[in-house]
Amino acid sequence: MDVDSYLQCLNYMDSIPKVDGVLDITLKVGVPIGTFILGFVFSWIKENRKESKEVKNKKICVDEEIHRVMQGVEHSFKECVSILDLCRRNQRIESHRLPPEIEMPCIETFFWGIAHEYTQDERHYLSFLGPNIKELNVLIQKVREAPKPRDLTAMASLAYAVLEHAPHCYAICETLKTGVKPEVVTPVSFADKLQLKSDAIDSMRERYSNLAAMQ
């Protein structure tokens, strides 16, 4: 075969349309699909991590708020013990440091969105905490807005109502912190827990002892 014939043969072969092989077809189709799948997976992982971080942060906010609620309940209890002591000594109540309200913005905002992250018992106590704190706030507000603060008998009655309810609220918070179900708590046992010295508490202690002796 001469050179011209050989060149013509090459030109003819080049002119024949090429048919893609299986590998070529796989690459052409598979690469875009694979890229899409990888993009979807990476996006899902990113969103999942973001959601997990948000849930974790919300739980931290709720846990910290439970601690703040405990502090608010403890402070309100101590203030009302002081009011009762003043009433027992027939002293005028010039002022007090009762909080306007014990607030729970994080629990009210976040809880229902992350409730699935808590155990059944935790959900029970968290949902139970709100109404109890709301009731305590009503009692605190009655003390703050007493129409006759110089009426020591009325003030003592209002302050005592706070003492009766505050330990229960504190016990709910403590259960959420420790996981241990609360025992029956009284103003006296709660005052002892806080190591408070009070004539009013001592009087309650004596009354409880007398009632127990009569049973």
Image: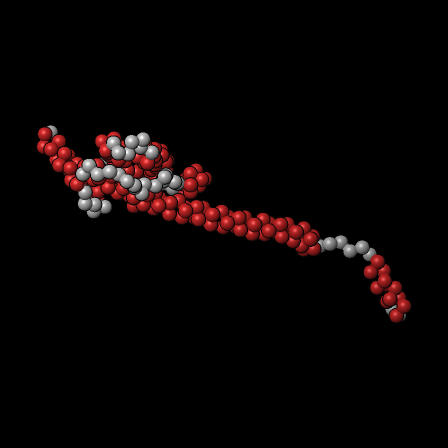
Q: Position of residue 104 (x, y in %)?
A: 39, 40
- The residue at 33%/34% (across/down) is 145
The image quadrant where one finds the C terminus is: top left
Left or right of 4 on screen, residue 85: left
Q: Is residue 105 left or right of residue 181?
A: right
Q: Quadrant of residue 175?
A: top left
Relative image position of residue 194 (x, y in whole percent): 23, 46
Q: For this view, does 126 lie left or right of residue 13? A: left
Please state which of residues 173 and 123 is positioned toward the viewer in this rendering.
Answer: 173
Is residue 97 visible in the rendered structure shown here? yes
Residue 17, position in %: x, y? 80, 55
- Farthest residue, direction top: 215
Relative vertical location of residue 30 with respect to residue 2 in this rendering, above or below:
above
Q: Residue at x 28, y 40 (%)?
A: 94
Find residue 121 and report its horizontal and vertical position in percent.
33, 38
Numbered circles on residues, count: 0
User: How are the colours assigned in the image?
Assistant: secondary structure
At a point 50% along the width and 49% down the height, the residue shown is 50
Point out the image quarter for the N terminus.
bottom right
Identify the residue at image location x=43%, y=46%: 58
Q: Is residue 25 above or below residue 150?
A: below
Q: Is 129 on the left-hand or right-hand side of 29?
A: left
Which residue in the rendered view is the most extreme toward the bottom?
Answer: 3
Residue in the foreground of this view, choosing between 105 and 23: 105
Q: Image quadrant of residue 203?
A: top left
- Res 176 visible: no
Q: Nearer the viewer, residue 176 or 52?
A: 176
Between 17 and 189, the one nearer to me in the picture: 189
